[in-house]
């Protein structure tokens, strides 16, 4: 995170958008698969959103590491 603060790495706009959407979706009262009706199965959509965010996070980490090897 400090590399972003120092301006050494720019996070892709899609990653920011998906990150914000994941947080909002997790805490929003509207759910595609409601936990109240389907119990633990209702958490699958939340896990899917967080899974997508995890994939984007790994992609950003690889972009940052690739930038380090290019500059070195």
Image (cartoon, helix red, strand yellow):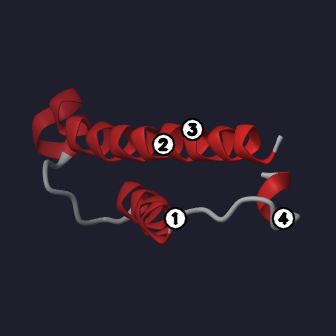
Instruction: Report crowding for label 1: few under 14, some 14 to 19, many 20 or more residues within 10 A (C-alpha).
Output: few
Viewer-nearest residue: 19 or 45: 19
The quarter holding residue 9 reads bottom right
Q: Position of residue 6 (x, y in %)?
A: 88, 64
- Return the disc, 4 or 3, that comes first in the chain's sequence: 4
Residue at horizontal 44 percent and vertical 47 percent from the top: 56
Q: Position of residue 27 (x, y in %)?
A: 42, 59
Q: Position of residue 4 (x, y in %)?
A: 77, 61
Q: Give the Cα separation between the discs numbered 1 and 3.
A: 12 Å
Q: Which mark is residue 62?
A: 3
- Return the disc, 2 or 1, that comes first in the chain's sequence: 1
Residue behind mark 2: 59
Query: Does residue 16 appear left or right of residue 32 in this picture?
Result: right
| 66 over 29 or under it: above or below | above
Residue at horizontal 48 percent and vertical 66 percent from the top: 20
Instruction: Report crowding for label 2: few under 14, some 14 to 19, many 20 or more residues within 10 A (C-alpha).
Output: some
- Contact check, label 2 and label 1, Cβ < 8 Å: yes
């Amino acid at each position: 995170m400090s590399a972003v603060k120092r301006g050494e790495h720019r996070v892709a706009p899609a990653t920011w958008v998906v990150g914000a959407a994941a947080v909002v979706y997790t805490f929003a009262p509207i759910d595609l698969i409601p936990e109240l009706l389907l119990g633990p199965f209702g958490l699958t959509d939340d896990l899917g959103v967080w899974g997508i965010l995890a994939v984007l996070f790994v992609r950003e980490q690889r972009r940052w590491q690739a930038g380090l090897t290019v500059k070195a």
